[in-house]
Image (cartoon, rainbow, N blue to C red):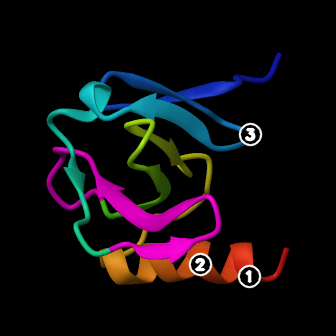
């Protein structure tokens, strides 16, 4: 049986696709403050409170106070700009 979730900082994330969480669920995480506008949300990045973990791409929905975090990816990114660019370019190609 395949595991359908993975844990980061005691939060569970879908292993197959983005996971939606509220801002309050991520109160100890860093939410990058300079996301790019993208259709229905903002292309940004988040970082768990784990040293040297890396940045994860995230679609940010300020009105709903929610994020769709791309923790299912096999990689993290060295900077929030790289994580946001990954998501921005992925969304542009769809």
Disc 2 marks which residue? 88
Q: Is residue 70 left or right of residue 28?
A: right
Per the image, label 2 sits on a secondary structure element best described as helix
Circles 3 and 2: CB atoms closer than 8 Å:
no
Name the quadrant containing residue 56.
bottom left
Disc 1 marks which residue? 92
Disc 3 marks which residue? 16
Indicate which disc, 3 or 2, sits on the residue closer to the N terminus.
3
Q: Position of residue 90 (x, y in %)?
A: 71, 76
Quadrant of the frame with the N terminus = top right
Q: Position of residue 71 (x, y in %)?
A: 52, 47
Q: Is residue 28 left or right of residue 22?
A: left
Cα–Cα span, label 3 and label 2 = 19 Å
Per the image, label 1 sits on a secondary structure element best described as helix
Q: Position of residue 12 (x, y in %)?
A: 48, 23
Cα–Cα span, label 1 and label 3 = 21 Å
**Region of the chain picked out in magenta, as a range:** 35-53
Mark 2: few/some/many CA within 10 Å (<14, 14-19, 20+): many
Looking at this view, name the residue that lies furthest to the front.
Answer: 63
Q: Position of residue 67 (x, y in %)?
A: 46, 43
Indicate which disc, 1 or 3, sits on the residue closer to the N terminus.
3
Q: Residue at x 79, y 23 (%)?
A: 2
């Amino acid at each position: 049986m395949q595991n359908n979730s993975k844990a980061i900082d005691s939060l569970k994330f879908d292993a197959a696709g983005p996971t939606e969480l509220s801002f309050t669920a991520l109160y100890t995480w860093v939410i990058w403050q300079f996301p790019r506008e993208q259709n229905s949300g903002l292309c940004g990045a988040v970082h768990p409170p784990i040293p040297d973990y890396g940045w994860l791409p995230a679609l940010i929905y300020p009105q709903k106070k929610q994020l769709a975090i791309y923790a299912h990816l096999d990689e993290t990114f060295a900077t929030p700009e790289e994580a946001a660019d990954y998501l921005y370019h992925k969304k542009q190609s769809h």
